[in-house]
Amino acid sequence: MSASTILFLDFDGVLHPQHDGEPTPVGRIFCHLPRFELVMRDFPYVRIVVSSTWRHQFTLDQLRARFSPDIAVRIIGVTPGVERVEGQYLPTQREDEILKWLTQNEGEDVQWVALDDAEWQFRRHRDRLVACTWYTGLDEDAEARLRTALRQFGRGANNEQ
């Protein structure tokens, strides 16, 4: 695997707020995408893996189509599912999916960060999680924490442009 940093990206509660069990209004879907893409342009060595549940409903090409072309080409895959116990979404399931992707892609030693709103889904690697507030998404505070994490877990602070 290359010297890239991997960003595991959730959509709901990150790229747009969630609305407490209600569908996100059409005008709000991906409302934080421009902010996300600006950050990614400052870290050109970061590759993206979609960890969102959207990966179950859309193909990789359909997911990429939501992003600007320069960001879409950096989306290299989606995380695999993991077995549920009695149909339940397990604590740490998102983290387990990320670790499974890393194992399957010989990326155990790669630097990575997760951008997600489900903090309860991480236990062992919370230091690599940039948690968004589900009803806010990627706001200014989360953007600042994402930039810090990408510098910390990326190839180094000198790579930020």
Image (tube, rainbow, N blue to C red):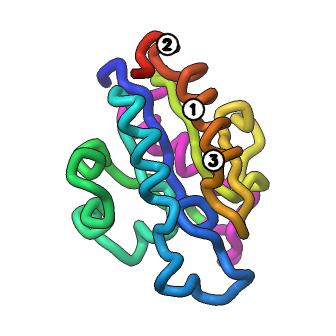
- Figure check: 148 above or below 78: above
- Kindly indicate the quadrant of the structure image that contains residue 114: top right
Q: Label 2 belongs to which residue?
A: 156
Q: Magenta residues, as a range? A: 84-108
Q: What element carries label 1?
A: helix
Residue 146 highlighted magenta (yes or no): no
Instruction: Tell me residue 119's x, y (percent).
Output: 75, 52
Amino acid type, callout 1: Arg
Q: Is mark 2 on a helix, strand or loop?
A: loop
In front: 80, or 126? 126
Q: Label 1 belongs to which residue?
A: 147
> Is label 3 in contact with label 2 (beta carbons under 8 Å)?
no
Q: Label 3 belongs to which residue?
A: 95
Amino acid type, callout 3: Glu
Amino acid type, callout 2: Gly
Report whether 144 appears left or right of 31: right
> Which comes before the other along the chain, label 1 or label 3?
3
Report whether 128 appears left or right of 25: right
Dot 2 surroundings within 10 Å: few (below 14), some, or many (20 or more)? few
> Which comes before the other along the chain, label 3 or label 2?
3
The quadrant in which the N terminus is found is top left
